[in-house]
Amino acid sequence: MNDVEAMRRALRLAQEAAASGDVPVGALVLDPSGEVLGEGFNVRERDADPAGHAEVVALRAAAEQRGGWRLDGCTLVVTLEPCTMCAGALVSARVTRLVLGAWDEKAGAVGSLWDVVRDRRLNHRPEVTTGVLAEDSAELLRAFFEDRR
């Protein structure tokens, strides 16, 4: 699965989050061959879970599928720039590559407000690809928040 195909799948997951009343963010983890190891969408509202971000849900599912917490060789694809918690989680899981859609100017930790994933003080720094279907991701978020206002 290439980056665009993976992001399209993540966008479908983000729509599931919106349908359940949560911020529309979707994520999936691909193994080195491009197969899906785990996927998720925001479940903070649904599960009353402060750590229920799409990235954390997907990372947990992938680690369970793999049988270990190290996700080296894997790619995390997410519709919105990860926050500090999620950026820290993907670094801790040793994810090799991050693909993101829209930037998060209010809470992003991959270059917007902070740059956790490129901090040289950390023991692991994933490769980062940005802007994949960014407008689609941003539009989904805009529509969700317009409906809430």
Image (cartoon, rainbow, N blue to C red):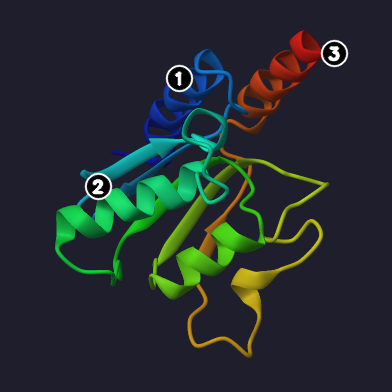
Q: Secondary structure at mark 3?
A: loop
Residue at image x 64%, y 19%?
140
User: What amino acid does circle 1 point to?
Assistant: Glu
Residue at image x 37%, y 55%?
75
The image position of residue 147, as x and y in percent, is 75, 9
Residue 49 visible in the picture: yes
The image position of residue 144, as x and y in percent, is 69, 16
User: What amino acid does circle 3 point to?
Assistant: Arg
Would you call the spot at circle 2 few (<14 residues within 10 Å), some (14-19), or many (20 or more)?
Answer: some
User: What amino acid does circle 2 point to?
Assistant: Gly
Whether residue 50 sits left or right of residue 102 in the image: it is left
Instruction: Of the two numbered discs 3 and 1 on the same chain, state the one appearing first in sequence.
Output: 1
Would you call the spot at circle 3 few (<14 residues within 10 Å), some (14-19), or many (20 or more)?
Answer: few
45 or 8: nearer the eye?
45
Mark 1, residue position? 16
Would you call the spot at circle 1 few (<14 residues within 10 Å), some (14-19), or many (20 or more)?
Answer: many
Q: Residue furthest front?
A: 48
Mark 2, residue position? 34
